[in-house]
Amino acid sequence: MTNPATTPMTDPMATRSRTRARAFALTSAALLGAALLTGCGNGSSSVGSDGKTTVSVGISGNIFDLSIRLAEQNGYFDQRNIKVKYVTLTAATGTSALQSGSVQFLNDSPTNFLAALSKGLPQLAVGTNGGGNPLGLVVSADFAKKHDLTADSPADTVAGALADSTAGASSANTKAEAGLFLKAHDVDPTKLKWVSLPSPAADKAALTKGEIDWFVTSEPIPLQVQHDGDGVVVADPLKVPQWAYEDAGYGQLVVVKKSYANSDADTVKGFATAVQQATAYIAAHPTDAKVLSAAQTTMPGAPDDVLKSSIAQVEWPKSDELTDAGLNKTVAFVKSIGAVPDAKVSSDDWTNKYLP
């Protein structure tokens, strides 16, 4: 850096000229930045020199992202001149990312979608790419040993053991879904001690440290805890009918902003079609090596046996088409767990027009 004490005197006119030039440059940069932010904020996708449209997709890093990952891996997006960038989001950040235009597509839970609609946000579901609640209720190894619980323990036995326990909860959704299981076996969930935690990863950490006895969350985390020897999965959708697709009608949704669907209809159609192709592939070939490979990308670090079990817990539809009956069942389920008390969906909030 120049020492001010030794800096030579400069011509005042030249100094003013340089000052004006710097001000102009800063103003131009600010205007350019604002333009770029506006371009991002309106949710527009971009077309590269190769003629392919790049879109950003919000995912959550669980088993429901599988069809999107497989669509990329099997070249279904590429066939439709689409490139995908992934943005990992949480239940708390997904809606705002879609609204701001940070992502053009959101692989969303029905609860978050209905919550957004209840706030009057202009979102549109363009397909469903997975059904059911692939949840696992995992107890610590010590708790399982103390209460003689195994993966094969009857549901009544499991619920009875949980009546006097400390549970972890990282979302109101999973806490309510655990409550459905408990109440079905005459256990009052309000009588338990609940520990609020920020994420499923925090649930897992608290369990291994002995701070909680059990938690419920989406796969693969519960099965991975079991694989590592730190706990036992004692309840899943096969044991808890309240979580099963047949009862809950609960399925993952591909969601966009209505304005984006109107302005980039071809891209929305290409994306929705590619995801449906991948979902149908999984439905027909759930144990295929390509599906497992995509699952390894979706949930890196999870053992293959955990991935295979997680895939099997999802109802993979042959068609991503939405129906009134299915959505009404979903609304009823979301209301039953108190997640969105005023949940409702109209024909303006979903469409199958972008599917083949």
Image (spheres, helix red, strand yellow):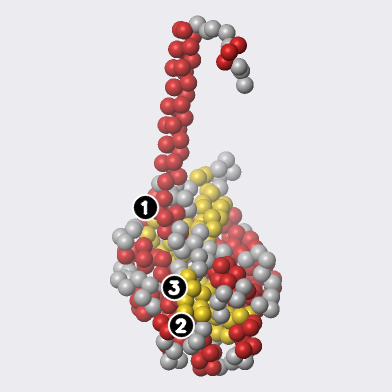
Q: Amino acid at mark 3?
A: Asn
Circle 1 sits on which residue? 259
- Residue 193 sits above or below residue 301 on the image: below
Can you see residue 246?
no
Dot 2: element? loop
Residue 341: percent from left, percent from top: 32, 73
Numbered disc in front, either 2 or 1: 2
Q: Residue at x 52, y 44 (%)?
A: 47
Badge 3 or badge 1: first in the primary sequence? 3
Q: Which residue is mark 2?
A: 192
x then y, percent, for residue 191: 42, 84
Q: Earlier in the sequence, mark 3 or mark 2?
A: 3
Tell me residue 323's x, y (percent). Answer: 39, 74
Circle 3 residue: 173
Residue 227's quadrant in the figure? Answer: bottom right
Q: Amino acid at mark 1?
A: Ser
Give residue 348's quadrant in the image: bottom left
Q: Nearer the viewer, residue 220 or 247?
A: 220
